[in-house]
Amino acid sequence: MAVAILATGRRRQRCWRRLLLRAHLFAAILWLDAILTCNGQKPINLGGVKKRDVYIAGFFPYGNHVPESHVGRGVMPSVKLAVDHINENPIVLRNYRLHMWWNDTEVSNVHDSVYVFY
């Protein structure tokens, strides 16, 4: 009797696994179909409309007197490159131009930088 119950439990478990696998497969097929047939966002013709400027702030340890300044000097070119890539892409932020204003935090760790604001 115990063997029959155990075998039934295993069959039921296999059945649920198959059902779950089929559900995942079905969801993946629907997802792929949506991606392949979707037109996505298309760039619109601005027709001479001026892009709006959006400014973000970047605070980096940059000065030579700060021990972690190599981090700020290393991150700065990456952030500038990211801003350039965003501005060059006609789909991302279509009607906007992104700018970054940066400043040297002149602090060596996060605790000091948060302390400055309080």
Image (tube, rainbow, N blue to C red):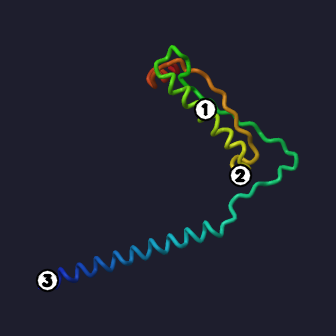
Q: Amino acid at mark 3?
A: Val
Residue at position x 69%, y 64% in the image: 39
Is 111 displayed left or right of 17 in the figure?
right
Q: Which mark is drawn over residue 77? A: 1
| Label 2 crowd bin: few (<14), some (14–19), many (20+), radius 10 Å | some
Q: Residue at x 64, y 37 (%)?
A: 81
Whether pointer 3 and pointer 2 mark residues with C-beta atoms closer than 8 Å, the reply is no
Q: Which mark is drawn over residue 58?
A: none
Spot occupied by residue 51 in the image (x, y as percentages of width and height): 79, 41
Task: Tell which residue pokes out farthest to the left in this image.
Answer: 1
Work out whether 24 lies above or below 45: below
> Residue tagged by mark 2?
91
Label 2 sits on a secondary structure element that is loop
In the picture, measured across the screen, residue 102 lies left or right of residue 47, that is left
Tally of marks = 3
User: Which amino acid, by three-letter code, is at mark 1?
Assistant: Pro
Label 3, label 2: how many angstroms apart (C-alpha)?
Answer: 62 Å
Residue 71 percent coordinates (x, y): 50, 27
Badge 3 crowding class, 10 Å Cα cut-off, few under 14, some 14 to 19, many 20 or more, is few
Q: Is residue 114 above or below residue 40?
A: above
Q: Residue at x 55, y 31 (%)?
A: 75
Dot 2 or dot 1, earlier in sequence: 1
Distance between the Cα atoms at labels 1 and 3? 67 Å
Q: Residues within 10 Å of mark 1 (few under 14, many from 20)?
A: few
The label nearer to you, 3 versus 2, is: 2
> How far apart are the two marked residues, 2 and 1, measured between alpha carbons?
23 Å
Name which residue lies at 32% across and 80% down: 15
Q: Which residue is mark 3?
A: 3
Q: Position of residue 59 (x, y in %)?
A: 57, 26
Q: Earlier in the sequence, mark 1 or mark 3?
A: 3
Q: Amino acid at mark 2?
A: Ile
Q: Earlier in the sequence, mark 3 or mark 2?
A: 3
